[in-house]
């Protein structure tokens, strides 16, 4: 799926349609010190089964997310594109 570098979209801060720069969202590195991973490590220590809440079946595709940055005020809005798509989003040159 190809998307232009700049698109016109609604900015909730400006309250009007303006030009937005488009970036594909990428998740940052995870912290090993946050509460969820500490709890998971504590549960997995020793002879245990699986941790409650982990998915046994993984989804085939992820939802693609765009970050739209307003050219006027710099406000960033998330936009989820479509449903779960196997194709990744590409920014057109």
Image: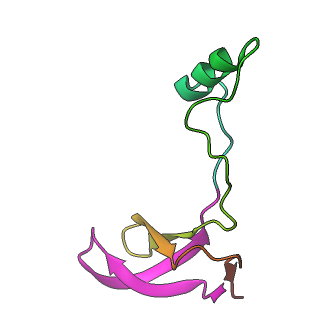
Above-or-below relation of 81 to 3: above
Residue 46 location, quadrant:
top right
Image side of residue 46 versus residue 74, left or right: right
Q: Residue furthest left?
A: 15
Specify the quadrant that holds the N terminus. bottom right
Residue 6 location, quadrant:
bottom right
Image side of residue 29 versus residue 52, left or right: right
Q: Along the line of sight, which residue is nearer the eye, 19 or 88?
A: 88
Above-or-below relation of 31 to 83: above
- For image coordinates 70% across by 76% down, the residue present is 86
- Image location (x, y in percent) of residue 89: 67, 78
Image side of residue 72 versus residue 66, left or right: left
- Image location (x, y in percent) of residue 31: 64, 31
- Image location (x, y in percent) of residue 29: 69, 42
Instruction: Check residue 25 for magenta coloring.
Output: yes
- For image coordinates 62% across by 27% down, the residue present is 37
- Image location (x, y in percent) of residue 78: 45, 66
Number of numbered discs overlaid on the protein picture: 0
Above-or-below relation of 35 to 67: above
- The magenta span reads 1-26
- For image coordinates 39% across by 64% down, the residue present is 75
Image side of residue 75 versus residue 37, left or right: left
């Amino acid at each position: 799926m190809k998307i232009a570098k700049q698109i016109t979209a609604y900015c909730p801060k400006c309250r009007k349609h303006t030009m937005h720069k488009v970036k594909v969202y990428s998740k940052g590195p995870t912290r090993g010190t946050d509460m969820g991973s500490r709890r998971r490590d504590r549960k997995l220590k020793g002879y245990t089964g699986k941790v409650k809440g982990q998915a046994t079946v993984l989804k085939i595709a992820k939802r693609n997310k765009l970050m739209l940055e307003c050219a006027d005020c710099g406000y960033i809005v998330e936009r989820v594109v479509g449903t779960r798509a196997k194709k990744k989003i590409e920014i057109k040159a």
